[in-house]
Structure formats: C-alpha cells, structure tokens
Image: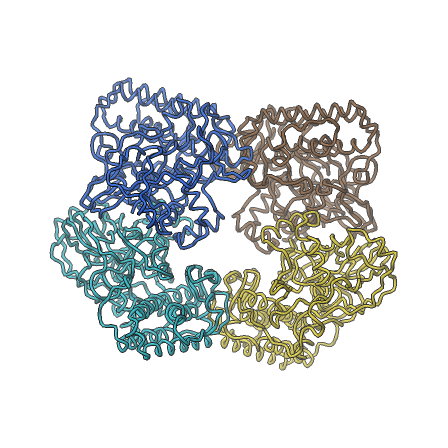
Chain colours: A cyan, B yellow, C brown, D blue
Amino acid sequence: MSLIKHSESLTSNSLRQRFRTVRDFTMQLCEPLTPEDCCLQAAPFASPTRWHLAHTSWFFETFLLKSSPGYRVFDPHYEVLFNSYYNTIGEQFPRPRRGLLSRPSLTEVYAYRRHIDEAVAQALNAGRIEENPQLANIIEWGIQHEQQHQELILTDIKYLFWQNPLLPAYRESSVPLLASPAVRSRSTPPAPLWQDFSEGLREIGHAGQGFAYDNESPRHRVFLEAFQLASRPVTSGEFLDFIDDDGYRRPELWLSDGWNFINAEKLTQPLYWFHRDGQWQEFTLAGPRPLKLDAPVCHISYYEADACSRWAGARLPTEAEWEVAAANAPIAGAFVDTLLPNNLPVHPRACHAHVRVVMQDDRDGKAPREPLGAPHLNHVDLNAEPFLGNIWQWTASAYLPYPGYQPPAGALGEYNGKFMSGQMVLRGGSCATPSTHIRPSYRNFFPPDARWQFSGLRLAR
Amino acid sequence: MSLIKHSESLTSNSLRQRFRTVRDFTMQLCEPLTPEDCCLQAAPFASPTRWHLAHTSWFFETFLLKSSPGYRVFDPHYEVLFNSYYNTIGEQFPRPRRGLLSRPSLTEVYAYRRHIDEAVAQALNAGRIEENPQLANIIEWGIQHEQQHQELILTDIKYLFWQNPLLPAYRESSVPLLASPAVRSRSTPPAPLWQDFSEGLREIGHAGQGFAYDNESPRHRVFLEAFQLASRPVTSGEFLDFIDDDGYRRPELWLSDGWNFINAEKLTQPLYWFHRDGQWQEFTLAGPRPLKLDAPVCHISYYEADACSRWAGARLPTEAEWEVAAANAPIAGAFVDTLLPNNLPVHPRACHAHVRVVMQDDRDGKAPREPLGAPHLNHVDLNAEPFLGNIWQWTASAYLPYPGYQPPAGALGEYNGKFMSGQMVLRGGSCATPSTHIRPSYRNFFPPDARWQFSGLRLAR
Amino acid sequence: MSLIKHSESLTSNSLRQRFRTVRDFTMQLCEPLTPEDCCLQAAPFASPTRWHLAHTSWFFETFLLKSSPGYRVFDPHYEVLFNSYYNTIGEQFPRPRRGLLSRPSLTEVYAYRRHIDEAVAQALNAGRIEENPQLANIIEWGIQHEQQHQELILTDIKYLFWQNPLLPAYRESSVPLLASPAVRSRSTPPAPLWQDFSEGLREIGHAGQGFAYDNESPRHRVFLEAFQLASRPVTSGEFLDFIDDDGYRRPELWLSDGWNFINAEKLTQPLYWFHRDGQWQEFTLAGPRPLKLDAPVCHISYYEADACSRWAGARLPTEAEWEVAAANAPIAGAFVDTLLPNNLPVHPRACHAHVRVVMQDDRDGKAPREPLGAPHLNHVDLNAEPFLGNIWQWTASAYLPYPGYQPPAGALGEYNGKFMSGQMVLRGGSCATPSTHIRPSYRNFFPPDARWQFSGLRLAR
Amino acid sequence: MSLIKHSESLTSNSLRQRFRTVRDFTMQLCEPLTPEDCCLQAAPFASPTRWHLAHTSWFFETFLLKSSPGYRVFDPHYEVLFNSYYNTIGEQFPRPRRGLLSRPSLTEVYAYRRHIDEAVAQALNAGRIEENPQLANIIEWGIQHEQQHQELILTDIKYLFWQNPLLPAYRESSVPLLASPAVRSRSTPPAPLWQDFSEGLREIGHAGQGFAYDNESPRHRVFLEAFQLASRPVTSGEFLDFIDDDGYRRPELWLSDGWNFINAEKLTQPLYWFHRDGQWQEFTLAGPRPLKLDAPVCHISYYEADACSRWAGARLPTEAEWEVAAANAPIAGAFVDTLLPNNLPVHPRACHAHVRVVMQDDRDGKAPREPLGAPHLNHVDLNAEPFLGNIWQWTASAYLPYPGYQPPAGALGEYNGKFMSGQMVLRGGSCATPSTHIRPSYRNFFPPDARWQFSGLRLAR
C-alpha cells in the first residue's frame, strides 16, 4: 500500500500493544470531564468530546471492521452521525450541529468504544494481520488518527471552558505552573539567537520507515536561498512588547486579510489572554493564571504571527526552511503524553534561559524595525529549544500538494488531499500532541484565522 | 400590591403546599432526562433544561431571598448566569450562549434548587408572610413563573430531540397515542359548528380574586361587532386539506411577512410533521408516530394560522372575542399535570367526535373559499371542545398594553411590559401547560414566526 | 365598486386635470436630480427614483390600460421589472436588487411615462369613464398611489444623499431654513398643552364621499377611555433633553426589541443628526444645517418615539384616540405641494410659539418621570399646531384590519391587506406628503425600526 | 529605485506619449456607457466605472502631483472617496458602498481626469523627469495601474449587466461572434497536446529592463520536477463534457472548500452560462449568444478549474511551471487593445483547430479518469495557442512572496505585498488585458472563489 510508508515489523503483538495504549490514553484524557462537558460544542470549528470519542471508533469500524467477516455493526445510525467529512462513505451529520445531540449518551459511546476495542483485538488475535498486511496499515492509520483527535479533545475543551464565565480548569495541577515570580522584568528578555543555513538544493518530505501521512510525500528536492532561523520561538513577553508597541493598531504590519480580521473581531491580544486586577492573565487547561512571559506565545492566528514577525524585522520561515532546520531534531519538547502522566499542566513550558549574549556593537546597530534584534551567532545549540513539542509554529507556506503528490485510493484519499486550499502549514507539534505522533516532516494545517490551537511562531530572515 | 390581584387567604400553609407541589413537579418533568439532555440548547429562542432549573430558582433568590435577613447567596456567579432579561437586576449571560455552559453541573443545579427550597420554606415557617403580605405575592409570582418554565422545558426539549436523527422520545407512553387507525378517511371530518355572539360593549381583562399577571389588567370595556366562533380548533386532518389544496404555494392566502417567511425557510408543513414510508408522521414527546388527524393542528406559526383561516373563508378571532367567548369556560382540556401523572403522552388530545350535522343546502352552497364551511348552529355546547387546554390558539391581536396599563414598579416591571411589540397574543393554554396556571384572561405572546410552542388556531368570522 | 368610496362626480374632465397635475408634480420633483441620482438604491427598504417613476406608470398600465382595447404594451420586460409586490400579477424583480439596473435609462423611463400619460388621456377622452365608472376608480387609485411614491422619492433620495460624504443638497433653498439663531436656549421650551377627551363609544374609519383606501374601512365603533393629547408634537429641542438625560442609555425606558435595536445599530440620536464643530447639525433636503430645535423631532423609529414618551411620563396615542382628536382637523400644516412651488425647503416647520403658561403649582409637582410635564388646560386651540402635515406621528397601534375589513378583489387586494403584520400605524402626513393625499382617517404604516420617513410623535396620557 | 526595474530611456517624450495613449484608451472604453451604467456597483468585489475613472486619476494625484510645487488639489474630498486601500495615505470610503455615491457626477469625474491629465502633462513638459528619474517610475507605475483598471472596468460592467434581466450588450459587435455553426459536435474535440519539460533548477521572476511589479521579484531559482503542459487551454466544449459527466455533482473531484462553495451557491456551470430554448448560451460583452464551444472556458473559479483538471486526470500547473513554459512566449493572443479598435468583441477567441492526432493505442488505453486524455507529443508548436492573451489561467500556486521579496517603501508597499494571503496566482492575461500590460513573469491573483474575471485553465501533469 503506497500511502503508508513504513517497513518496521508491524506484528500483531506490537500493534495490539500500541492500539491499546493509544485507546487507553484517550480515555485517560476524558477522566476529568463530566457528561455535560463532553457533549457541548463551543464553535463550528470545534467538536464535542463525545463526538471525538465516537468518531475515532467509527474510523476503525468503517475502514477496518465493516469488511471483516462476521462483524456486527454497533448501531447503523452511527454511520452518518459520526462520519466527519468522508463523502465517499456517505452522508454526514452537519458539523456545526454536532453540539445538538444529547443522545447517544456518553455511556453509550463508551460502550461503542469497548465494542470496537474488542473487535479490533479479535482481528489482531485472529492472525488476519499476518495474512493481510494491508490491515496493519489501516490500524496504524487509525491510531495516528486517534492521536490527532486527542489533541483536538484538549483544544476544543479549552475553548469550551473559555466560554464559561466560571473559567473552570480541565485539570488542576499539583505543580504550580510558574515556579518563578509571575511577572519578570520585561526589560531583559533572553534574546533569540540566529542560526545560519546556506543556500542549496535540499530534500524535504517523509523518508525512511516509520508511518507518515500521504501529504508528507513524495520526498522531493527544493532549492533554498540562504536563511537564518531563530534559536527559539517568540515568547509571550516579546509578544507583549509587540502589543505595547501598538502592534494591533498599525496597519502597515498586517496582511490585508489579517487587518480586516482583527478589526472585525476586535482583537487586541492572543486568544485566552485577559487583563484582571491590573495584570495580564491567561486561561489555561489548569484554569486562569498570571501570564507566563518566558513561555512561547501561543493561541495566535497566522495573521498575528505574520504581523509580529514583520514588526520584529523578520518573517516566518517556509515549511521547507523549517524542515531542513529541524531535520535531525530530537523529540525533546513538552508533549501531552509526558505532561499528563506526570501531573504537569498541558501548557507550553518556558524557553530555556539561554546564556544571554549581548554584543555591544549589535545593540548599537539595532534598527527600529528590528525590536527582537538578536546577536548573530553561527554556532548555537538549537536543541536547547526543541523544534518538536511545546507549540505548533506557523510557517509562511500555504498548504499545497508536494510535486507528484497522489492521495490514497478510496475514502482515505479524503483524509488530507481535499483540504489543500485556504490553509497554512504549521510545524513542530505542541504540548497537546502525543510525542509518538510527531516527526520533522509532519504537516499540520489550519485556516489563517485559527487561534484555538497551541499555535505560535519562530522567526526567520 | 396592586399588580397581583388575589384575596384568597394566602396563609403560610397553603403557599407552602403549593410551592412544594410546583417545585416537585419541575423535578418530575426532568426525571426522563439525562445530564446531556439538560445542558443543550437547540436554538437561540430555546434554553437548556438545566438553565430553566436554575433560573426559576434564581427568581426566588433574587426577588424574595436576597433581601431576607441572614440569607446566604448560593453562588455569586449565578446572579449573572441565570438572569434572563432583567436589566434592572444587572448584567445577563447572553441568551444565545446558554448552551455553552457545561458547568455548573446538573448536580450543582439540583443542589442550588434544594438550597432555595429550604430557604423559601424557612421564610414561610418563620411567619414572615403574615408580617409582610407582600412576600406572599412574590412567592405566588415565583410559582406562576416556574409553571411557565415547566411548559418551556417540554417545548424546548421537544425541539432539541427533533434535531437528533435518532428522534428520541422524551417519555415512552404506556398508552398508545392513537387507539383508532392511524389514517382516517379525510373525506369526513367532523365539521366545526359556529356559535353566534352579538354585538355590544363587553369587558375583558382580569377580574376577581385569583392571581393574574399585570398584562391582564386593567379590566376594561371594548366594543365588539357581532361575530361567530368555531366550536373547536382546526384539526390536523383539516390542515392537511389546506396543504393538499396547495395552501403553502398560494401567495394570496398569506400575509406578506408570512409568505416571505415560509419561502425563506422552505416550509411546507407544520413543525414536527414529516413524510415516511408514504405516510404523514409527527414527532411527539413520545417519539415519532402516525399523524393524529382528529387532534388540533399545532406547532404552526401565526402566519400559518392566519393563512389557514383565510383559506377556510374565515379569520382568527381577536383576543377580546376569544375572551368574551371563553369567559366562563371550565378548565377541562388536556393539561400537563393530569397527563403526566397518568402516564399519558403530553400531546393534544383528539377533538371530540361531534355528531356531524351536514345540512344539504349548506353543502350545496359551499363556496370554494370556504372549504371548512360548516353548518351554522346557534346552540352548541362549546364545552364539548374546551377553550382551555390542549393547544394555544393564535389570535388576530398584537400584544399591546390594555388601556391604562401600568407595569409593576421595580424589576418585575420588566416581566411583561417591555415585550409589548412585535408579538401576537395566544390564548387558552396547551397540553404542556399546568392546569393551575391558566385562566380565560391569560395572555400568552410569541413572535409571529414561532412554531415550537403547542400553537394552533380556532376560526372566527 | 365597494373598495373605493366616493360619490363626487368623477367626470372625465376633473379626473383628467387631477391626473395631469399629479403626474406633472412627479416630474417636478425629479428636476433637481441627475441620472445617477435616479438610479441608485441606498438600502433594501428604499428604491431608486427611476424605479418610482417607472413603477407608478406600470401601475396605470397594469390595472387600467392592459385591458383597454388596442393598448400597446410599452415593453413586455417592464411587467416584471416594475412590479413591486403583486403576486397576483406575476413575478417581480427582487426589491433589494432594484439598484442594480442601469437600464432602461432615465430617458427611456421618461418615454415610458409619456406613453402612459397619452394612453390614459386617450382613455379619458374616449368617454370610456362615463361608460364604465369603475375605470374612474382605478385612475383615482393610481393617482393616490403616485402621491405615495412622491413622498417616497423624497425620503429615499434623502437617505441616498446621506450615504455620501459630500452631503449634497436635493435642492438649495432660497429661504434660509432658520431665520432665528440656530441654537436657542434649551431651558425654555414652549411647553405643550394637554387637551382632554372624555370616555365613550366613538366612531373611526373613513366616512363620507372622498377617496379612501380599503384599510380605512369599515367605519366602526370603538370604546375609548378618557385621555389627553398634547397640543403639539415633541420638538427636537425636547428630544435633545431626552438624549441629554441619557435617554439612549437607560434600558428601563425601552421596549425590549427597541433596546436590542439601538444597541445592535449603535444608535444615540435620530437619523440625520450629527455633531460637527461642537454643534448639533441635521442633514436636510437642503443640505446640512444647524439643528432646528423648535421643529418637531422626526426621523425616529417607533422604538425611539415610544421610549421618549415613556421618559416624558406619557405614552403614544392609539390610532383611535388620534383619529377622534383629529377628526375635524383642517389640512393646515406643511405639505410638499405648497413648500416646493414656493421654493421652501421640504422640512418640518417650527411649532408655533405658544404663549407659555407655566403655573407654579404644576412646576412644583413635576415628577422626575415627567420631564415634559405640561400645564393642564382644557381649552386649547389644537389647530394652532396642525394634526395634518409637518410630520407623521407614530401611534401605539399595530397595523391590523378593522373589524369586518375586506380587501378589494383582485390584485389591488394586495395593496394594503397583506401588510397587516409587524408594522405600526402612523397618522397625520408630513412635509413630504401632498396635501391632497391626506385625511384624518388615513393609515400609514411602517415597521417599528423604520427611521427614514418624516416620523415623529405626539404625546398622550 | 529598486522596486521598478527598467533602464530603457524613459524620456519625457515617450512617457508623455504612453501616458496619453493609456488615458485615452480608458475614455474609449467608457464610450458605450451611460452615466447610470457608470455609477452602479453589482457586488462588493466590483466597483462602479466612475470610481475606476476617478481612482486611477487619484493615483497620479496622490503619488505624483501632490508633492509637485504649485499643484492645486482638485477636490479635497476625493482623497478619501477614491482611495482604494492605502492605509498609509489615510481613511478610505468603504469599498462595498462605492455604489451609493451619485455624486460627484460623471461630468465632474471627467473634469477631474482632464485636470490630472493636464497637470501630469505639465510635469512632463517642465523637464522635471530628467531632473528626477524617480518621477518617471511613478508615472510608469500609474500607467500600469490604470491598465489594470481598464480590465476591471470591463469585467465589472459585464457583471453589472448580467444582473439586469434585459441582458444589455456593452457593445454590439459588427463581426459575428461565431462564424461557424453554434453547436459543434462535441464528440470530436481537438485534443490538446502535451509538451514535455525536463526536471532541473530553473529561474523565474522578472528579469531584464522593462517595467515589472515588485511581486515579480526577486528573480530566483526553483527546482522543478519533470512535467507536461497542455498545448492549449481547456475549451468550453470540454468543460461541457465535465458538466455532462456530473462534474458538479461528484465530491471526489473537488477540494473541500470548493465543494462547499458550489453547494452553498448552487453552482452547476460557469458564470454567464445559461440554458435557453434548449441550447447553452453565454452572456458576453456583446450580449447573449450561443455558447462558443471551441473557445477556452472562462469565468470559472479556482475550485472549478481544479475540479475540472482532476476530472481530466491532470492537475493545474504551478506558477513556476507555467512561467518556465511561457518564458519566451510571444504576445500573440487576443487583447483588448487590438479587439476594441477593430470592433471585435472582447471575448476569448477560439482555440486553433490543431490537426487532430488520435493514436489508436492511446484511445484504447483511455482511462475513465482521463476524458481529456491526449496524444503525447514531444514537439508541439506551443505558439499555436498563445500563453499570453485570451484568458487568465489559474495556477496551483498560492499567492505568496518570492524568496527575499521586499515591498517598496511607502504607500506603494501596500500595492501588492499585503494581499499575499488567501489568493491564488493566475497567469497569462486575457482578452480584456491590454497587450502592453502583460509579460511572462506577471502575477495576477484572486481569491479562489472569484469567477467574474476571464479566468480559465491549462492542464498540467
């Protein structure tokens, strides 16, 4: 099967183990939630938790189990109710109305999940995988699919709780979110460092053995001019400088669509930021708390990322630049599957306090268009601030097919290909992404006005 | 207190009893509902059940308990969260967003209700009523208010379940909704009879001792021309004749706003009607079932009622005509507080099978504009088909103040007065109304496009 | 023909004269306008001048000429293009798109008018009227119809020019709009006087011989409680007091729909008012100028009229009260057919400076809710401030059929009857109304949020 | 000045000549239009002709003349009225309201144009160009800008006339649009030929001496895989095959946004196509006429172009592929400045009747997904169907900055840069483009749902 590229031995045993782990983790994510939390939909772009729970099960039922001999469909209504967007499969209950379904109840959806879990386990036990390696691919795809929805469960529930004046916490954290004092002096931000990349013909796209989505293929050559990339994402403290420098009121910093967007929506700060008691606060999955200035700014739209980069005298990297830079990056940042079991809040962690290198001559030459102007170093340990994990990073690239891209045959062809218009690529994975889900070639994508994901930026120039 | 008119002995005892009965009945209404059912909002004009549960308690807390010495507010957030529209009280959580609140949970709202129940009971025990008769008035108002929301709980939950392709039943009924065969011949509807009323100066508005809302006062004189009123509401079978006679496609039958409305919404039948397996069905609180042709048509807008009356060569009665005719009507129709405890479905019951009087000469003279043309009798027992109960009846009257109307002082002045624009008056009470809540002078009101109430029509001419 | 009630001798001669006068006056109204002015549509509720010119001709063509032997239709396309809302006639070009038609040109429409004028003249010459009195009725109806559109031409062009930052004048006036200083002291408004009307059974509706629309019939009895009516409309100066007293910011003064309306539209003053150079200005058909404080306030919605009346401790009169009071009023106010030929601006003229009667005892007793509180006199010369002319006066009455109302048969049945929902009645006629078009029983109607007519208020209580 | 790259001798003389020619051609375009035609706006994305006339003059006034010594501003109001989107210049009259301005009149705007023409001529006479070469650049930019609006005048007026049921012609043509019979057999379309391009590092972007916009720079290297490009655009006849093959009803052919778009708008054919008398017709600038099957399909959105390419088993070319193929293309297609003076209709001309090469083996192997499947030839004379002229060709490329792109300093920096989001690139120029305005590196851009431009497609694979 050309669409899934991996050659590692997908034995029934290892697959069974991974399937169970991922399915269990979804349940673990829902532990803090009430039935009411699970059935509400805060916006057309979000979905109820219960819908996520059912849809990820529907995925296995539809693509794997329905064609299995002897499989009994759990409930024929579910085919329509929990189909997200697969026209090839058939009709879909309209997305904006997912929050109007009080039935099936959470209990019934849990039963549905168990039904699917057992049926998939049986399929794995029955040795069918060994007979038909194609099935392993579908299970793997279903696992990856479920991991995407794990992140969406968290971002959607955060957005839901944000609508509630009570500002409830998804999960209180036993560890304070900020060990250090809440408000650092903003006069001494640890300046980012710039790493140089030389021009040349490079390769991007998925290579190697592990799983990758179709949209990461084919691996192909791109010519890149020389560029520089910042050693770490822009922090909330730096974004506050952008705000304080009238960033949201200066049209020359914005794309035309972005300027219209922030004015129509009356936006003056990232999503989840608010002012209370004379202090900047942010709403997190652990509830409201003082704004963490040294963490990467997130919950901003592409437009805000773009404007902030222009204000900083820089720009967003293309996805090719980003991928070349991140090609060998370790999976070292904050991820949901390490945060949650350790009872840490699902929130971007602070950027490491780099040794600050302020060279006088650079300071002196700081141009007004370059407020984040940073010392220029050729040898920075980029791993100090991981490319993977913590926040998604908007790139300057529209989400388009790679040269020679072919969507998979059948309904899975709708998974990625048909969304290749009107969206921008994000890279890197966030604190809400499972660490086993991310890789340097991973292409996430959202419309340029999306703000409810953990989306921030890294500067290029 | 001039706004509440009743002189019956409102002793602590009788009030305590009524308060408990009404509050308990609200709980009884919620028994079939899950936590998820209770938190969803299907449309901006509807509210989640849980909101109704909290708001009716908020009403007692705000208007009665807050000023009580020693009363402890349950949760200060609730003042805003559960304020419906009282600007005098303060800010309100926006109505269209009531369905975005997963917290406080149903359990917490039940605790809130118990807290209020106990505090009101204490107030009644403490003899404060005897000291301050004003308090009795407020409790009475709160009881009536809660009864209005009992009806809304049912109509809102029906509308919610209608959004769900599973078409769940609010409560299965042990009694079949239709004893008789589902589809009667439509060729022999029991024709309505016309009762004559002579011209003259009449009085309408609340009189006497019981409770009435401010909008039913003052009682005043109106001059009425002679008119006739049908002995019973228009049935679903007759409305089907209207549909089959192209009623929804003939602009000459419609008000201009109505014609625009049905075309913009693509309406071709009452809300909750649908075609399945070659048969007309209707969705009820007991689930879907064959359309009951001999029951009053309901879930129609004012526009549809008006068009149907024009098609029938008749018109809607004014509220004054209706009230004069119903002045001495007994409380004899179907009401929620008799249906539910008897395990009967909350649905309009069939019109009695009047002895059909078809006079040949009348038949012959039937004009094409008068398809419901009915024999004309002067002496009909109107009680055979009650004015009160079963369905609300749209009148031809806009909802406006009576001559000399004064809203009550304070926040309760917002209860009725400020809605006196853009709405039409309905009379009679429905199968979802508590029987102790209705009276001939009762003025219900909804915008002319509202369809989710149990609203039908009675012809006049 | 029952629908038009008049018995005066409608000879061909008198009709011919009136027809020509009215048609000519329409042309006179258009003299100051360019072809561009005539083809734009500033809002869905307004129409281009050229459309008015064509539609009024279409009216004669459709209802009178088409059935005439030998009549040649000017252009078959016009049947659809210039049909306003007559479903009985056939399809209509959508109202909100009337401003998208650059063709037929103004020249062609003028040719269309001449074509119609000649054909009507021929019909009148041919003695057909004497043979068929019905035709006279239709011509009369067409004349009245054209007069309505004369007013709309002015109100629509005013609204169009208001969209233009150049604020062009429809017609410069040779007479200054304000002889007196622009801003009078607002501390001494000439207080209105109250006239008493006793309770009793009254008659309203059209009586007598002249033309009246179907909606003014049948004349019928109403019972009225005793009431008082102010001797003159509320002035702009008094409305400024309402504004300065936070009238637009106090929800308790507003109907719920009105409060939502002014907040959604961010309204804080009447249409056409604006602040410039520290002074209140208003935009008039003669261009912008200082606000005329002693003229009746106009260009306000029903909601604003209602709120202002509540602020004044009064209310709006019902249409029955108004008509009883105005029953014998002379046609004495400002009208377009006297203003325009005298080169006077089409704008409400100032209220006469009544001798101000301030009785000390009344002053002392002035309640805070009654800022317009006025001395109470039984014998006021109400004619001093005419009921007819100057401004339309919002009433408290919804636009509904009179008891026994029957629309005319055929397409003219759509003229008035189908609009009897969602609108409020206005009475009196304005400075943009032709004086030969108005009468005490005349019922004008607009939605409660309409502001672009010359609509103000007169207080009742 | 880095932003405009040309070194040809821009003497006052040649510039003066070009300026006059372009300005005159604008006037020539308006000759068939009435004042009414010139002031209407059919959609928010279109503008009135008169606005184009004024705005192009405003451009010279703002960027060239205002800073000229002694220049007298024509009317200070125009600065806001005719500013399109330059925030750096100041406030703008809102774009969707441009059609609400009946003043200044067409006559006044013509006077404004003459005023500007004279002032620019004076500047050129005065020898200021020789002193300040920068001015020549600005005039050149203004000329190019005006040419863009010449095309918009035509596309906007076509869209306006399309709203009018009279379907007026912009200009009758003395030459019949179709010499050949209207409906050719659709069974024998002249198959397109594929030309091969080998992989390799290529250069795109503006090079050389002539004028180019900032967005065409810098010239830079891109790596291209081997690809094939069709020898001509897709014709209307072929697009009809797509329609007849249920193209608009098969979701698998569409991008998700495109599928939503055509369903929301109920689209089933290109803009301006309609069915009448059992025949496909299209509305053209010469009025309605039978659909010209052998001309390139145009007036389709990016979504439709993309779906049609997928149906054809091909894809859209990237802008880099297109530019590499078109690099040496002659300016040989249909352009407005040759069509109009020769009294030819401004409409795409037919594709040349290539000798049809049907190879049997190819026919046999034609897959159902490749209905346009064409013989494969290496040596096709691509010039037979020009790359430049006739229709704009949608590419698969989002409109984004080239590597190292810098917008010009000042207000002209807003010309192109801020629109680099949410749009797709089109290449080639159309029959409404002036031939002196186009070049292979020219990047046009529109949102993916835009249909009112002369936009079609050329296949790649």
**Residue B46 screen position, x and y as percent:** 57, 63
User: Closest to the observer: D259 or B36?
Assistant: D259
Q: For the point 18% across and 45% down, which residue is it?
A: D200
Q: Locate residue B14: give its quadrant.
A: bottom right
**Residue D28 screen position, x and y as percent:** 42, 23
Res. C195 visible in picture: yes
Image height of A258 relative to D14, above or below: below
**Residue D444 screen position, x and y as percent:** 33, 38
Left or right: residue A334 versus residue C16 is left
**Residue C364 screen position, x and y as percent:** 67, 51
Left or right: residue D52 versus residue C155 is left
Image height of D253 relative to C439, above or below: below
Res. C186 visible in picture: no
Image height of C27 relative to B87, above or below: above
Left or right: residue D25 versus residue A187 is right
Instruction: Report the number of discs.
Output: 0
Q: Quadrant of the N terminus of chain D?
A: top left
User: Closest to the observer: A110 or A362?
Assistant: A110
Q: Locate residue B64: give its quadrant.
A: bottom right
User: Closest to the observer: A365 or D7?
Assistant: D7
Q: For the point 81% across and 45% down, which residue is it?
A: C218
